[in-house]
Amino acid sequence: KEKLYLSSAQSRRVFGTYRAGIPSRFLREIPAKLLNRHGTAASRRPAFRSAASPPSSSSSSAATTASTPFAVGCRVRHPLWGFGTVTASTPTDRGAKVTVHFQQVGAKKLIAELAGLQLI
């Protein structure tokens, strides 16, 4: 009897940012009776902590944060991604456009008000 072992990464580092690993859609085509799974996606938690600190802000980005409550360096909380630090902030007509570095998922660009960010 032959065996095939398939594995997947919980996360990958892409251009300095951690990304969640998503299993291939083709895996759903394999009949369940042929699979012996160890550690499903629902039971997995990221096992890493980012060793790299969030990128430092430039003086030009610090100047643009005067009209938004989400200033560079502020700590925020996102409903899905948890706690993070604002690394860039620009006021727009739709709200503050921010880049936030989250410990578990890396950097994300968001409109703060639409994303449900809360200042800590």
Image (cartoon, rainbow, N blue to C red):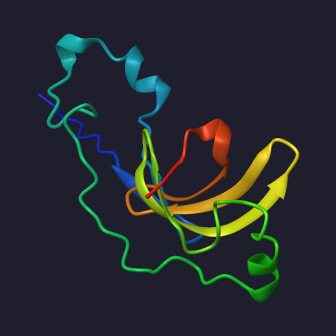
Q: Quadrant of the C terminus?
A: bottom left
The answer to which image quadrant residue 40 occupies is top left
Q: Residue at the location (66% across, 41% down)?
A: 113
Between 58 and 95, the one lying in front of the other is 95
Asked if 73 appears above or below 67 in the picture, the reply is below
Left or right, residue 94 beside residue 34: right
Between 99 and 42, the one lying in front of the other is 99
Between 80 and 114, the one lying in front of the other is 114
Left or right, residue 101 beside residue 92: left
Q: How many marks?
A: 0
| Residue 9, position as x, y percentages in the image | 35, 51
Of all residues, the one furthest to the right in this rendering is 93
| Residue 55, position as x, y percentages in the image | 58, 79
Between 51 and 73, the one lying in front of the other is 73
Q: Residue at the location (81% across, 57% down)?
A: 91
The answer to which image quadrant residue 62 occupies is bottom right
Q: Residue at the location (61% across, 84% down)?
A: 56
Asked if 11 appears above or below 64 in the picture, the reply is above
| Residue 85, position as x, y percentages in the image | 50, 67
Q: Quadrant of the N terminus?
A: top left
Asked if 120 appears above or below 88 in the picture, the reply is above
Left or right, residue 47 beside residue 100: left
Q: Residue at the location (38% across, 57% down)?
A: 104
Asked if 86 appears above or below 1 in the picture, the reply is below
